Image: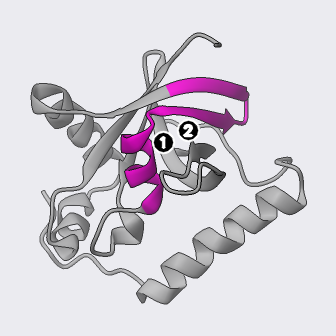
């Protein structure tokens, strides 16, 4: 259990890092910036959702781990307050595309609830022991997002 003393860099550093990461992906055509989850670690994937107002594709880099055929991420907004736009978009239209180091997957996104959320949160805690302290900074529960495979069409 985290002690509440977890240190984060200033929010502008966190946000700048993720913007730069997305830029590297774009500039290299995805050759750099995606990786598979390492043992007791997370991977990086590019999630594409449909904008709830614009109808345009929106791209974001997310950390994930695999849970059977599913990918699991968190709607953490860089540990800032509020929900990230990609999560609001995914709730409005749960069909999305994920690009991992291994290729592209069509997925349907949803929030884990109940015992499933507890199990997946515990798995994230194994990866990052400061998770509870980081979540406390947000002032709200962080959604654990399950990206389930879906058939084309």
Above or below residue 15? Residue 64 is above
Q: From what the image shows, is residue 103 above or below residue 48?
A: above
Q: Does the magenta stretch include residue 10?
A: no
- The answer to whether residue 44 shows anywhere in this view is no
Residue 4 position, x and y percent, is: 14, 74
Q: Residue at x 50, y 49 (%)?
A: 63
The residue wearing badge 2 is: 37
Q: In this view, does 79 lie above or below 60?
A: below
| Residue 64: assigned label | 1
Residue at 31%, 81% in the rendered image? 7
**Start-end of magenta stretch:** 85-107
Determine whether the residue tagged by mark 1 lies in a helix, strand or loop.
strand
Pointers 1 and 2 in contact (CB under 8 A)? Answer: yes
Q: Distance between the residues labelled 1 and 2?
A: 7 Å
Crowd rating for badge 1 (residues with CA inside 10 Å; few <14, some 14–19, many 20+): many
Asked if residue 53 can be seen in this view, the reply is yes
Nearer to us in this view, 95 or 5: 95
Quadrant (top left/top right/bottom left/bottom right) for the N terminus: bottom left
Q: Residue furthest right?
A: 28
Foreground of the two, 88 or 141: 88
- At label 2, counting other C-alpha atoms closer than 10 Å, the crowd grade (few under 14, some 14-19, many 20 or more) is some
């Amino acid at each position: 259990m985290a002690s509440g003393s977890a240190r984060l860099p200033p929010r502008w550093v966190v946000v700048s890092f993720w913007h730069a990461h997305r830029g590297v992906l774009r500039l290299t055509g995805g050759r750099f910036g995606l990786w598979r989850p390492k043992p007791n670690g997370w991977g990086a994937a590019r999630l594409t959702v449909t904008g709830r107002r614009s109808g345009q594709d929106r791209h974001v880099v997310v950390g994930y781990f695999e849970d059977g055929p599913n990918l699991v991420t968190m709607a953490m907004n860089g540990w800032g307050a509020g929900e990230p736009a990609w999560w609001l978009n995914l709730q409005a239209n749960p069909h999305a595309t994920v690009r991992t180091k291994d290729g592209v997957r069509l997925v349907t996104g949803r929030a884990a609830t109940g015992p499933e959320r507890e199990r997946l949160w515990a798995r994230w805690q194994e990866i990052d022991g400061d998770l509870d302290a980081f979540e406390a900074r947000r002032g709200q529960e962080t959604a654990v997002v399950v990206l389930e495979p879906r058939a084309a069409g």
